[in-house]
Image (cartoon, rainbow, N blue to C red):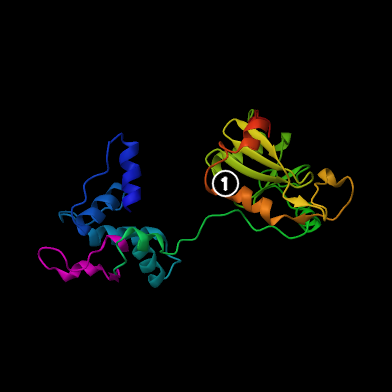
Amino acid sequence: MWRVEALLALLDGDAAPPVRTNPGADVARILTRLGFVGRKGVLNDAAGCVASAIKAIGENISVENKAALMNAWCGHMYLGDDSEDGDVDGAYWGEFKLVELPRDAEALSAIAHKRPGLIALPERGEELYLSLMNTNCKRCQKPPRDPALCLVCGEVCCCAGACCRRGKHGECAQHAAVCGAGVGVFLLVKSTKILLIRGKRICLYPSVYLDQHGEEDEFLKRGRPLFLNERRYGALEDLWVNGALDYDTLALHTSRVGSDFY
């Protein structure tokens, strides 16, 4: 929550995030800023804001999971009954009990958070090829002539296909704008190359599928069995997770303007 507020303050042009006051007021202020408003006339209504946020999570999630999610969001901001008035009800925001979490930086960094990553790929290249050859594109509802698999969400796109072009933008560029805010990581199924899109620039990155000698077989010209290279795929995932596509030497030297074509 502190990080969210700091980012919002930065976007507003503030030199520093708002000063922390007390957990209830801080939670109410941040959630209100995000659109989760508490009860009318109640000052610093953390319970009302949390209840509003819980309602917005969705109806298909159990009460226990909603409470756990809110605990992950706000639990680190609860300080127990250390408040001046000794109000122990601060531990209960509405009907949801938020347990106290460690407050020091080292302990907070150890709280389990799922690391974002690219989708899992099959071990053998032919398995991926055969599984996607008859997969329809969601936009044109036909199997793509040159399928591109988004490694972020798993959607299959028509790479450089005229059927799915909107204006001057190809489907991969359109998908990257929606799926990754202009950043796209695609596996070109037929060539096994990696297509990187960053804004208006594109780069054809080395394949993550190699033969038993560690060599690429573009468009399967030699017909050799290809296997997923975990080291290459892990390095590619690290680039995407860390937002480092702009800093990779190979990507920079081989990139060019022209993402709209794809």
Above or below for 171 versus 229: above
Give the amino acid type for the residue marked by disc 1 in the picture: Trp
Mark 1 highlights which residue? 240
Where is the C terminus found, in terms of image quarters? top right
Q: Is residue 175 left or right of residue 5?
A: right
Question: Visible in this render: residue 55?
Answer: no
x then y, percent, for residue 115: 51, 57
Q: Is residue 47 left or right of residue 180?
A: left
Above or below for 110 versus 21: below
Q: Residue furthest right?
A: 222
Q: Is residue 77 magenta?
A: yes
Q: Is residue 219 magenta?
A: no
Q: Residue at x 14, y 68 (%)?
A: 87
Q: Residue at x 21, y 59 (%)?
A: 24
Q: Which residues are magenta?
A: 75-99
x then y, percent, for residue 249: 62, 36
